[in-house]
Image: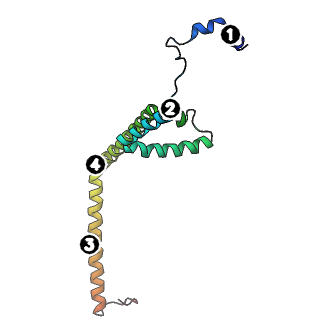
Amino acid sequence: MFASVFRSHSDTDAEQEPESGVQWPPVFESYAAHKAELDEAVKSHPDFGVWLRQYRNIEHVLSINGGPNEPMWSLSVEQLKQRYVTIKTVQERTKNAKRAFAEMHLEENAEAYQAAKDDFAAKEKAYQFAYDQHVSAARHGYTNDWRKL
């Protein structure tokens, strides 16, 4: 009965199977093997474990809201490691590019910054001198300022 259902499409389906074939009977990864591989990956690189917990939490939120097409739960440990390396590589590259741009910006504007800093210091010095003169005059009674100093 089932054979007739599967053969109903065409007899050429068997010819279109992948050349590597399917292992039969199938052998599936056990929980113990998966857990051991995951523990070894986290032990050898603890940041992977931190990322995995954060990624799992993000995936949970995304899956509630109709998240990505391929949730992390269906990925092997090797695929998770590849995704970790890809994501971290992009993050590091982005961080380095932003830092390089900031340093270039600072270098380009270093003279303007120093000029503004020097101008501010000169004005602050002039203000402090004028303030000290006013305070000194007020202490000696040479001011008609209504404020008491």
* Residue behind mark 3: 125
Q: Splitting the image into 4 quarters, where does residue 94 fall?
A: top left
Measured from the top left, where is residue 28 in percent x and y?
52, 27
The Cα–Cα distance between marks 1 and 3, rounded to whole angstroms, is 94 Å
Label 3 sits on a secondary structure element that is helix
How crowded pointer 3 is (Cα within 10 Å; few <14, some 14-19, many 20+) is rated as few
Q: Are marks 2 and 3 in contact (CB under 8 Å)?
A: no
Nearer to us of marks 2 and 3 is 2
Of the residues under marks 2 and 1, which one precedes in the sequence? 1
Q: Looking at the image, which residue is at 35% across and 40% down?
A: 44
The answer to whether mark 4 and mark 2 are in CB contact below 8 A is no
The amino acid pointed to by label 1 is Arg
Mark 2 — residue? 30
Say whether disc 1 or disc 3 marks the residue closer to the N-terminus: 1
The residue type indicated by label 4 comes to Glu
What residue type is disc 3 on?
Lys
Mark drawn on residue 102? none
Q: Quadrant of residue 40?
A: top left
Residues under labels 2 and 1: Cα distance? 32 Å
Look at mark 4 in the image and give the residue it sits on: 107
Tell me which numbered mark, 4 or 1, is placed earlier along the sequence.
1
Give the CA separation, mark 4 to mark 2. 57 Å
Which residue matches tag 1?
7
N-term-proximal mark, 4 vs 3? 4
**Residue 65 falls in image quadrant:** top right
**Mark closer to the chain start, 2 or 3:** 2
